[in-house]
Image (spheres, coloured by chain):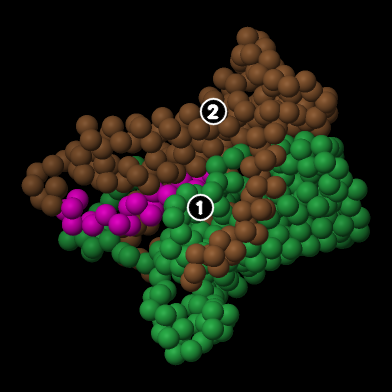
């Protein structure tokens, strides 16, 4: 991480206005989540604060509600498959763009990043209309295509950033010493790309797992994801069962954050900060 | 790598982009299912003459701009303080600002139901303190939608501003102050022009997200605070009006592009002025 030069000013110069605004920012970002945690342990049957008594009943209710369990399975499956496919398709494309000496490589690169500029709801509509209704592709097929398209820009950009740091001379040396292109890729290039691949995989899985717009439009029998099941539950009933699910997902996010920190660095992966 | 091999490596990705993105996106405008050709253009013209629809476009633009302004107002100070901090806690504070990005929008928005609901934190506090027996309706208002979207997109604003600010040497500000510039003048003449690229990126990302969000307006705004995103969903999944859905999709995308272009232009002007 490149740090700005140290200030000559005393470190504790007061900036009351900035500090107040920054505290407000943190309260808005994190405050509501704290209340959700409290409500999840209520023994009452509505979203009420302060919670009425303590119980784990809503965790039990969440664990026995079929759409959440099925949704969790669907979400995990789609997120894993989309991440793997986006990397399997994206890494070769990254290699071609960075090492291929192609004419118009900037155009090709921008083409791979282009899905990001289209609102997710619009992408979802296009796929729903044209592939599902128009061509009759199954809901699960279109859901997987949509999520893969969603992740492709991240896969190409993040692994590309890793590859840009790698010295092509290493690969040329391997080739010069008699290694074939495949051996060179697996023995020289891939190890260099590993942090980028890890970062893209974590980012891709989280992005797909949490997505609502695509999953909402591309629904069919057996393709309801967990966030969509939660959204639909909240729209129809006012009991705190979704608070309990939220607490479970919050804990899972903490685990992902710790794993990400160990792998590559949490702020690097999710903040795109430093390289 | 030979040129032929490079092209071969691109083929799967290009095929996926073509079949799963470019062709459907173009065909969505040219030929939605069960509609005559050029019907999308028709519907678009109708919408732009319909006061109800113009109201929705205006609300979408307004909410997007307010959320963007608030995110920059609150996010810039966080980014600035973190980028200038020498504390060992600054890394953790930065991580805390980014952490919400790991949670689904449903989870993040759900918190506001607890805060703003009729038996929520604010309502209970108002009645508990004896301020009022009938707390005001907080949920299903435009303010609720703005609050939810600000929470959702603050991390993006902070991260974008931070990446600009952490590259600016603190000594530049010291030099300006040392030469007699006031704090405000230093901010306006030194810091802001240099931080502008990050702020423009942040504003563009925040607006694009806020103006096209679905989860938050549907949960916190209810049916009375319709935005373009809700209208798109309505046409495509409730009334099955394909041409209408395509026209709204075009409107939404055009709005995002227009504001992105305008903020890039304003950012450049601010720097060269």
Give me the disc on residue A108: 1
Do callouts 2 and 1 mark residues in contact (Cβ within 8 Å)? no
Same chain assignment for discs 2 and 1: no
Chain letter, colour brown in render: B
Which one is nearer the viewer's eye here, A134 or B238? Answer: A134
User: Pointer 2: what residue?
Assistant: B255
Judge whether B233 appears above or below A238 on screen: above
Residue at x-position 26% and y-position 41%: B193
Q: Label 1: chain?
A: A
Q: Position of residue A19 (x, y in %)?
A: 37, 48
Residue A65 appears in the rendering? no
Q: Label 2: chain?
A: B
Judge whether B115 appears above or below B64 on screen: below
Q: Total number of numbered labels?
A: 2
Residue B82 appears in the rendering? yes
User: With A232 as the anchor, is A274 left or right in this view?
Assistant: left
Range shown magenta: B153-174
Q: Position of residue A107 (x, y in %)?
A: 47, 49
Give me the disc on residue B80: none
Q: Position of residue B122 (x, y in %)?
A: 64, 37
Q: Is mark 2 on a helix, strand or loop?
A: helix
């Amino acid at each position: 991480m490149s740090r700005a030069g140290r200030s000559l000013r005393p470190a504790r110069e007061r900036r009351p206005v900035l500090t107040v605004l920054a505290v407000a920012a943190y309260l808005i970002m994190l405050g509501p989540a704290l209340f959700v945690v409290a409500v999840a342990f209520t023994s009452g049957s509505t979203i009420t604060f302060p919670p009425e008594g303590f119980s784990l009943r809503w965790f039990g209710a969440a664990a026995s509600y079929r759409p959440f369990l099925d949704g969790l399975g669907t979400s995990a499956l789609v997120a894993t498959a989309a991440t793997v496919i986006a990397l399997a398709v994206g890494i070769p494309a990254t290699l071609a763009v960075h090492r291929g000496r192609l004419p118009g490589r900037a155009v090709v690169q921008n083409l791979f990043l282009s899905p990001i500029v289209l609102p997710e709801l619009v992408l979802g509509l296009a796929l729903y209309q044209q592939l599902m209704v128009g061509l009759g592709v199954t809901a699960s097929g279109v859901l997987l295509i949509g999520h893969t398209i969603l992740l492709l820009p991240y896969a190409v950009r993040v692994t590309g950033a890793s590859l840009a740091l790698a010295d092509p001379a290493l690969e040329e040396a391997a080739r010069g010493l008699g290694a074939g292109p495949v051996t060179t890729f697996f023995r020289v290039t891939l190890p260099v790309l590993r942090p980028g691949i890890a970062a893209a995989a974590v980012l891709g899985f989280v992005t797909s797992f949490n997505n609502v717009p695509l999953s909402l439009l591309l629904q069919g029998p057996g393709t309801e994801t967990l966030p969509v099941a939660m959204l639909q539950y909240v729209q129809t009933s006012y009991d705190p069962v979704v608070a309990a699910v939220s607490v479970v997902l919050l804990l899972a996010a903490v685990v992902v954050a710790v794993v990400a920190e160990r792998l590559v660095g949490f702020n690097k992966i999710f903040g795109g900060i430093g390289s | 790598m030979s040129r032929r091999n490079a092209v071969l490596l691109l083929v799967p990705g290009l095929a996926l982009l073509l079949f799963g993105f470019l062709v459907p996106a173009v065909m969505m405008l040219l030929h939605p299912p069960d509609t005559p050709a050029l019907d999308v253009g028709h519907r678009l013209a109708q919408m732009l003459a319909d006061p109800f629809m113009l109201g929705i476009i205006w609300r979408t633009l307004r909410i997007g701009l307010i959320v963007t302004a608030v995110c920059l107002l609150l996010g810039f100070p966080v980014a600035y303080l973190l980028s200038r901090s020498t504390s060992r806690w600054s890394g953790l504070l930065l991580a805390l600002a980014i952490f919400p990005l790991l949670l689904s929008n449903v989870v993040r928005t759900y918190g506001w139901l607890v805060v703003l609901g009729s038996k929520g934190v604010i309502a209970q506090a108002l009645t508990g303190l004896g301020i009022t027996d009938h707390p005001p309706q907080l949920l299903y208002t435009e303010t609720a939608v703005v609050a939810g979207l600000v929470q959702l997109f603050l991390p993006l604003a902070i991260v974008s501003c931070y990446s600009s600010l952490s590259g600016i040497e603190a000594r530049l500000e010291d030099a300006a102050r040392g030469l007699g510039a006031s704090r405000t003048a230093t901010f306006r003449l030194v810091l802001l022009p240099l931080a502008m690229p990050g702020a423009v990126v942040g504003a563009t990302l925040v607006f694009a997200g806020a103006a096209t969000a679905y989860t938050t307006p549907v949960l916190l705004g209810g049916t009375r605070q319709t935005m373009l995103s809700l209208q798109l969903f309505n046409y495509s999944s409730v009334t099955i009006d394909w041409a209408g859905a395509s026209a709204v999709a075009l409107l939404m995308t055009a709005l995002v592009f227009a504001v992105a272009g305008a903020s890039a232009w304003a950012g450049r002007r601010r720097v060269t002025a």
